[in-house]
Amino acid sequence: MSKKLFTMFLLFATVFIFTGSSDLMGCHRYYVGLYHDSNGVVHGFLCTEQTNDLSKTWTYLTIPNANWTRARGVNNVGDVVGEYQDSNGDVHGFFYDRSAASFTYPIDFDANALGTTIHAVTTAYDGSGNPDHTGTIHYAGDYTDANGDVHGFFWDGTDFEELDYTDSSSNVFPSILKGINDDDDMVGNYTDNSSVRHGIKYDWTDWTINNVDIATAAWSVLFDINNDGDMVGSYQDSSGDHHGYMKSGSTYTYYNYPSAAQTWVTGNNNEDWLVGYYKDTSDVIHGFGYDPDNSPYYFQLNVPNATQTRITDVSDETYY
C-alpha cells in the first residue's frame, strides 16, 4: 500500500550547538541519540566527532513546544531523523538537515495516523561514490493506525509503503522497521500472537525471521543493518537481562559493556563500529561506542550535563 505524504512543513526548531573544537573541517563521524536534561525532559542530539583528535561538537535538537524529541538515525552527511511528541500528545516524525540547520516536520504516514516514527535514513552518493547531500534518500520507520495497530513503512520522500511481516500462511503481524542500508534492505521486529517480539529482515523479495532470532532469548529485536548485511540488535535472556548482538552471515557475536547491568546495541556502520547504551549498577543509562580495531574497544559517550544518554546510530567516517 502506498500513501502520499500527509503533511510536512519546513520550520525552524530549536538547535543549540556546543563546540568542543573550533575546527569542523577534516574527517569526522556522526553519532545521534537522545538524552535527559536535569529536569527529566528528553531531547535529541547530533554529535560530530573529529577523528584526528576525537574532539566533539554537540548539536542539541528540540522541536518547538514538543513534550520530548528523540533522534533515531543519521546518514553520512549528518542528516538526522526521529520523532517528537507535540503538546497534544501526538507523535510525529521529523527530518533534520544538518547543512541548513533546519527541520522538516511534522511528517505523518497519513491523516489518520495516531503516531509516526522515522527510525533510519540512507545516504545518497554522486557518480564518484562520494556522499551527496542533494541526492535521493530513503527512510524506514513505523506508524500507528486509527485502530491502534503498528505497521512498518518504507518512505522514498514522496510515497509511503506499508510493510508488515507476513508468514508463509499469509498471516500479517504488527511490525516496526528500525534500520535500512543503502540497498534498501530493512530490519526491525514483529510481535507474534503471544506478544513475543522477533527480529526480522526484509530485502524486497522475502521476509527472513528464523535465522535472525536468538534461539534462547525471551525476545529479540534488530535495530540496524549495514551495506555488508551485518545486522545488530538486542535480546532479553531467560533471566530478564538485556544483551547486544551482531549477526554477520551465519555467525552471532554477543556484546556486553564491561561491568554493565544491561546492554543494548542499537546501531552499526560500514566499518563495523557499534553504538548503543547500557545501564550501570546504579540504574543510570550511558551511551557507548565500540571500535573493533582499537582495544579496549568499548568507549563511553555521554552528552555533557545529561542525566541519561542513549546512542541510537552512527555514521561512517566521512569528510562531508
Image (cartoon, grey):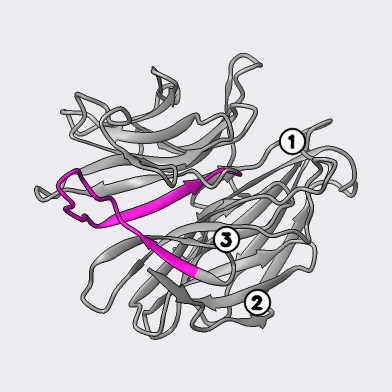
Answer yes or no: do the residues labelled 1 and 2 have beta carbons within 8 Å?
Answer: no
Q: Residues within 10 Å of mark 2 (few under 14, many from 20)?
A: some
Q: Quadrant of the N terminus?
A: bottom left
Residue marked by disc 2:
13
Is residue 67 in view? no
Q: Position of residue 221 (x, y in %)?
A: 33, 40
Residue marked by disc 3:
81
Q: Which residues are magenta?
A: 160-182
* Distance Cα–Cα, label 1 vs label 2: 27 Å
Tell me the number on the disc at residue 317: 1
Q: Position of residue 126 (x, y in %)?
A: 81, 49
The amino acid beneath tag 2 is: Ala
Choose mark 1 or mark 2, whichever is in front.
Answer: 1
Q: Position of residue 108 (x, y in %)?
A: 46, 76
Tell me the number on the disc at residue 152: none
The residue at 44%/42% (across/down) is: 203
Circle nearer the N terminus (3, 1): 3
Helix, strand or loop at label 1? It is loop
Magenta residue check for 315 = no
Q: Residues within 10 Å of mark 1 (few under 14, many from 20)?
A: some
Is residue 73 in view? yes
Q: Nearer the viewer, residue 204 or 76?
A: 204
The amino acid beneath tag 3 is: Val
Q: Residues within 10 Å of mark 3 (few under 14, many from 20)?
A: many
The residue at 79%/68% (across/down) is: 100
* Distance Cα–Cα, label 3 vs label 1: 19 Å
Left or right of residue 52: residue 15: left
Left or right of residue 32: residue 51: right
The amino acid beneath tag 1 is: Glu
Q: Position of residue 182 (x, y in %)?
A: 61, 44
The residue at 60%/35% (across/down) is: 269
